[in-house]
Image (tube, rainbow, N blue to C red):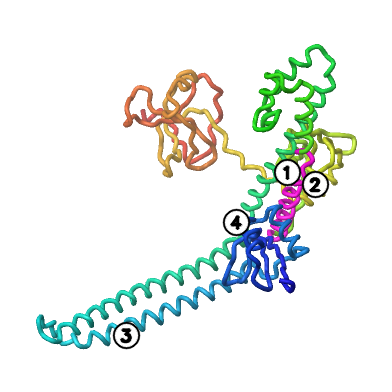
């Protein structure tokens, strides 16, 4: 094993670590790699982990010294696998042809309808030929099915690689990564807030009600977790109740626990890894467009909240916009609980983080209230005229929610309230458009969807 060489690679496309060994590994090393989650891929002659983790990265660095970028792309690996599966399909196709030919050759003795003569000396050989013919046909059918199976697998491999590279799939993958980033950042925020709280409690250790405060808060929970950890498989409240630990000792344990988690290198490694993947995915997706419209505090709050900030509050400042948070801001945004930047600096930070301000949602057409004989509305995918009835706002609100609603007009210019006729019952009750007599009356728009009642027609 003195000449053993191991190379480690990482592919950002599929988030997998790979180990290439120059020769067969010793059993202890093999089991260690296997326990870490690596699997042996015999066709590729390498060990592959299904996804990146800090522990797997440590093993790769320990064995290989460093981790290099994977040279083959996802599409190239898919093409190699598809070629291998195509070769299997061709092999099974040849086998199917051979088995079919063997069955046809054996069946020649029965081609003219010669039956098996029971009791004749030829019966034994005829039955053996019959069994051989049936077995050959069975194998031919199985091989033919295998041809379809391997062709389907080969097509699926290439389709999957192409699917992973689609822009819409990549955009959804970015959303998933941002959700993971918020989850890890939420753990840091929780630890920081708890640490700050327990430090403030410790500062009151000489007060008369110190014991009562610790008893009260030891079992409390914040939005994302408990304020006190478990200690030796028991909750700290148990030790406090039994008198095995003093209130000050309990506070010290809470401080050490949350201090460790607020500075956990494990969490920060996950965050840095996710940020690296986000940078790769956004680079592949295309250039991030810069937001040039006027900034508002709400836009800034949404931006930093998407990256894991805890309850951010933005407001205008002398130089631009200032932002404060209940917990330290994400490390790629700021190194403290607050930040004050100009509007241009906020725009640059958004581009650096790959954030694009969402386009405003299209406003819905207004809900109008005017008199008419009937109005053409779009309901359940079809346009049809609804006869109008009059009622008060209170009468309309008293109707069952499933028996009233708001629908678009056939011209899409406005919306109208509808309901089932209150004097009719059952599922066959007529749906009508509604004019509220005690609400503001709007001028009727010019639309072909409105039919007004003419006096001479009455």
Among the two numbered marks 1 and 4 on one chain, the one whose residue lies closer to the N terminus: 4
Q: Find the magenta span and give its range.
A: 261-285
CA separation, marks 4 and 3? 47 Å
Nearest the viewer among 389 and 178 is 178
Mark 4 secondary-structure assignment: helix
CA separation, marks 1 and 4? 20 Å
Mark 2 secondary-structure assignment: loop
Query: Disc number at residue 169?
Result: 4
Quarter residue 428 falls in? top left
CA separation, marks 2 and 1? 9 Å
Q: Position of residue 168 (x, y in %)?
A: 60, 56
Can you identify the residue that label 3 sits on?
101
Which of label 4 and label 2 is nearer to you? Answer: 2
Among the two numbered marks 2 and 3 on one chain, the one whose residue lies closer to the N terminus: 3
Side (left or right) of 404 relative to 276: left
CA separation, marks 2 and 3? 69 Å
Contact, CB < 8 Å: mark 4 with mark 3? no
Quarter residue 366 falls in? top right
| Within-10-Å neighbours for mark 3: few <14, some 14–19, many 20+ | some
Residue 267 highlighted magenta (yes or no): yes
Which of label 4 and label 3 is nearer to you? Answer: 3
Q: Position of residue 298 (x, y in %)?
A: 74, 36
| Within-10-Å neighbours for mark 2: few <14, some 14–19, many 20+ | few
| Within-10-Å neighbours for mark 1: few <14, some 14–19, many 20+ | many
Can you identify the residue that label 2 sits on?
332
Residue 77 highlighted magenta (yes or no): no
Q: Position of residue 448 (x, y in %)?
A: 48, 41
Q: Position of residue 332 (x, y in %)?
A: 80, 46
Q: Write the residue at 62% across / 56% down.
A: 35
Can you identify the residue that label 1 sits on?
307
Contact, CB < 8 Å: mark 2 with mark 1? yes
Mark 1 secondary-structure assignment: loop
């Amino acid at each position: 094993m003195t000449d053993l060489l191991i190379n480690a690679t990482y592919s950002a496309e599929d988030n997998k670590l790979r180990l290439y060994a120059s020769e067969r590994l010793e059993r202890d090393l093999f089991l260690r790699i296997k326990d870490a989650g690596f699997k042996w891929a015999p066709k590729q002659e390498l060990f592959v982990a299904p996804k990146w983790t800090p522990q797997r990265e440590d093993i790769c660095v320990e064995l290989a010294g460093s981790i290099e970028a994977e040279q083959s792309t996802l599409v190239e690996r898919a093409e190699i696998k598809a070629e291998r599966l195509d070769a299997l399909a061709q092999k099974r196709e040849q086998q199917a042809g051979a088995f079919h030919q063997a069955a046809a050759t054996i069946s020649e003795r029965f081609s003219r309808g010669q039956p098996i003569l029971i009791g004749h000396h030829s019966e034994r050989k005829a039955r053996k030929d019959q069994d051989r013919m049936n077995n050959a046909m069975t194998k031919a059918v199985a091989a033919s099915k295998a041809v379809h199976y391997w062709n389907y697998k080969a097509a699926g491999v290439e389709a999957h690689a192409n699917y992973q590279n689609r822009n819409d799939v990549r955009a959804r993958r970015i959303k998933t990564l941002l959700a993971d980033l918020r989850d890890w950042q939420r753990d840091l925020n929780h630890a920081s807030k708890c640490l700050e709280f327990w430090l403030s409690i410790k500062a009151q250790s000489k007060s008369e009600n110190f014991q009562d405060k610790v008893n009260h808060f030891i079992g409390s929970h914040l939005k994302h977790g408990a304020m006190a950890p478990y200690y030796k498989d028991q909750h700290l409240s148990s030790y406090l109740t039994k008198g095995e630990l003093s209130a000050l000792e309990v506070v010290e344990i809470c401080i050490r626990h949350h201090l460790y988690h607020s500075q956990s290198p494990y969490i920060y490694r996950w965050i840095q890894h996710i940020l690296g993947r986000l940078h790769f995915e956004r680079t592949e997706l295309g250039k991030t467009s810069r937001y040039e419209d006027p900034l508002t505090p709400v836009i800034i709050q949404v931006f930093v909240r998407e990256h894991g900030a805890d309850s951010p509050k933005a407001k205008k400042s002398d130089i631009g916009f200032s932002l404060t948070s209940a917990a330290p801001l994400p490390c790629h945004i700021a190194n403290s609980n607050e930040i004050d930047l100009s509007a241009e600096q906020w725009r640059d930070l958004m581009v650096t983080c790959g954030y694009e301000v969402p386009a405003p949602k299209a406003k819905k057409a207004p809900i109008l209230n005017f008199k008419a004989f009937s109005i053409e509305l779009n309901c359940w995918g079809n346009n049809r005229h609804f006869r109008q009835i009059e009622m008060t706002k209170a009468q309309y609100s008293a109707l069952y929610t499933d028996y009233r609603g708001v629908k678009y007009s056939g011209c899409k210019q406005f919306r109208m309230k509808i309901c089932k006729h209150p004097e009719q019952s059952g599922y066959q009750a007529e749906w009508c458009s509604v004019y509220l007599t005690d609400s503001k009356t709007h001028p009727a728009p010019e639309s072909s969807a409105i039919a007004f009642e003419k006096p001479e027609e009455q």
